[in-house]
Every structure is written in structure tokens, then in C-alpha cells.
Amino acid sequence: MRWPALTDEQIALERQPLTEGEYSFEVVEAKDKISQKGNEMIELQLKIYANNNREYTLYDYLMGTPKTVWKLKNFFTSIGIADKYKDEVIDPFHLVGKHGKAKIVIKDGKDKNDNPIKKAFVDDYVVKIQQHDDLNDDIPF
């Protein structure tokens, strides 16, 4: 096995946690799954591109229930496939490699040993507002 001999400062930088904010992401993996309550969902593995030139891996779970479909719709819009939302079905394979922007929040969570920790979650996906180039700014309102 080989490894880089990092300084203490380099190690500290590598272990720096993700902070709240909006970040660009890439979908690395997407799978169909069933939630604990029996709902269909898509498990996303996202590569988050942070401002400190680091990449983080986060998982998000999108469901199409009436209470959660808003996040699915925002995800589709964020990655540029808003028109696919109306199809009401998608093969997760088609999501891999797509890019968008996500709003990340930090919440209390638990590690594998049930110890309390702070964890990063995708709160929502950033929807780009389309600008219309055909608007004439010379028209008084």
C-alpha cells in the first residue's frame, strides 16, 4: 500500500467538514430502491464540489410521494431535464453524469456506532430562473 506523507496542516485541510451553502454537484450513481415505508425512491450518490477545492460524497433519496415530489421536481429542473418530470417515470441510469446545484444544510445525525454527530444533507436543489433575452428594458412600466 502507498500513501502520501501529508503534513498536519494538509491532514487538517483534508478532514475539514462541508459547511452549509449552495454547491455544484455531479450525479455519480443513481439506483432504484424501496424506502422503509415501501415507497419507490431513487438513491443518489452525489459528488459535491466545495469551494476549498475538495470533493465530498453525499447521498440523497428522492421519492415521488405527494409530500416529497417537490424535491424530485427541483432536482430534475436543477440538472436540466425539467421536461422529464411530466413523464412520471425515469430510469435512474439516465441521471448519472448530470450536473446541478444543491443547497446543503448541516443537521444532527448519528454515526455507525449511534454516536451524535453533525451531518451534511441535501436540503433542496437550486432551480435556475430562466432569463428572457427578448425583454425590452426600454419599455416603461
Image (cartoon, rainbow, N blue to C red):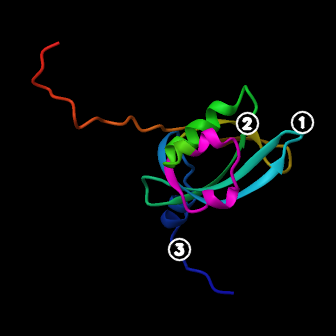
Q: Earlier in the sequence, mark 2 or mark 3?
A: 3
Q: Secondary structure at mark 3?
A: loop
**Which amino acid, by three-letter code, is at mark 2?**
Gly
The residue furthest left is: 138
Please tell me whether residue 133 is drawn above or below residue 47 in the rendered image.
above
Picture quarter with the C terminus: top left
The reply, left or right, for residue 17 in relation to residue 137 is right
Spatial CA span between label 2 and label 3? 45 Å
The reply, left or right, for residue 47 in relation to residue 108 is left
Q: Secondary structure at mark 1?
A: loop
Q: Please state the horizontal and vertical placement of residue 131, each as a whole percent of the image.
A: 30, 36
Checking the image for residue 64, the label placed there is 2
Q: Nearer the viewer, residue 10 or 30?
A: 30
The reply, left or right, for residue 141 in relation to residue 99 is left
Q: Is residue 59 magenta?
A: no
Q: Please state the horizontal and vertical placement of residue 22, each as a whole percent of the image.
A: 47, 41
| Residue that appears at 59% across and 45% down | 84
Q: Which residues are magenta?
A: 84-102
**Local crowd size for mark 3, using a 10 Å CA cut-off: few (<14), some (14–19), many (≥20):** few
Residue behind mark 3: 6
Q: Earlier in the sequence, mark 2 or mark 1?
A: 1
| Residue that appears at 79% across and 47% down | 111
| Residue that appears at 36% across and 36% down | 130
